[in-house]
Amino acid sequence: MASVFVVEDDHNIRELLVRALADAGHVVRSEATAMAALQGIVDSGPDVVVLDLGLPDLDGGDLLRMIRAVSTVPVIIATARDDDAEIIRLLDAGADEYVVKPFSGAELEARVRALLRRVDNGGESRVLSVGGLHIDLRSRSVELDGRPVTCNRKEFDLLACLAAHAGSVVTREELYAEVWREPYGGADKTIDVHLSWLRRKLGETAAEPRYLHTVRGVGIKLVDPS
């Protein structure tokens, strides 16, 4: 049994997919719009996302890039678009599988199972580890030296973004774009406030950093303190 998140704006198709997946024993959540889906995926940490491209508020390809900025969850594109160039573009953008409508609920469920087998057999890691810091992208949980660290949503997203680029400086512009989905905020102290909260939870300070290092005038770098 897996948790599957279905993103499909057509009510009838969405209900058919949800029913087929649930009848196969999966736990299924669904949304009809891109932004509601992104929030739901971030909050619930599903095992697989089934993503339609023709969404009312945002193209599914744009939503795929937003998902990939914060998660390694396997994504199956399920759409009527069958252009070879489009398929290649989306696979290159981070999709794991592509199925063209019309398809049956049984076929989709089989693809979900096959994709999960690939992930379980050595697919992309869903845990980011830097020193004693372990960030599980699926369960959205953090451990430091074996002890759980409680993070709110933005703290987790910020830490995961920095861990995904461990050892490299991530600029503030990049953090605003990837974590807050907005342009750089100029004199806004949002990042500094969240970094301060994270440092406190990781047992460090700006004056005596271990994991989180500010590179003045450039950005933030997460490093292995050892």
Image: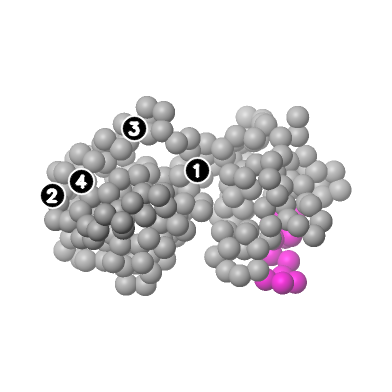
**N-term mark: 2 or 3:** 2
The residue at which mark 4 appears reads as 108
Q: Tag 1: residue type?
A: Leu
Q: Nearer the viewer, residue 166 or 196?
A: 166
- Judged left or right of residue 12, residue 39 is right
Q: Quadrant of residue 194?
A: bottom right
- Does the CB distance between marks 2 and 4 fall below 8 Å? yes
Task: Report the span colored magenta.
Answer: 185-196
Residue 188 among those drawn in magenta: yes
Q: Secondary structure at mark 1?
A: loop
Q: Position of residue 177 (x, y in %)?
A: 58, 63
The residue at which mark 3 appears reads as 118
Q: Quadrant of the N terminus?
A: top left
Other residues around mark 4 within 10 Å, as few (<14) / some (14–19) / many (≥20)? some
Residue 104 numbered mark, or none: 2
Q: CA distance from mark 2 to mark 3?
A: 21 Å
Residue lying furthest top: 121
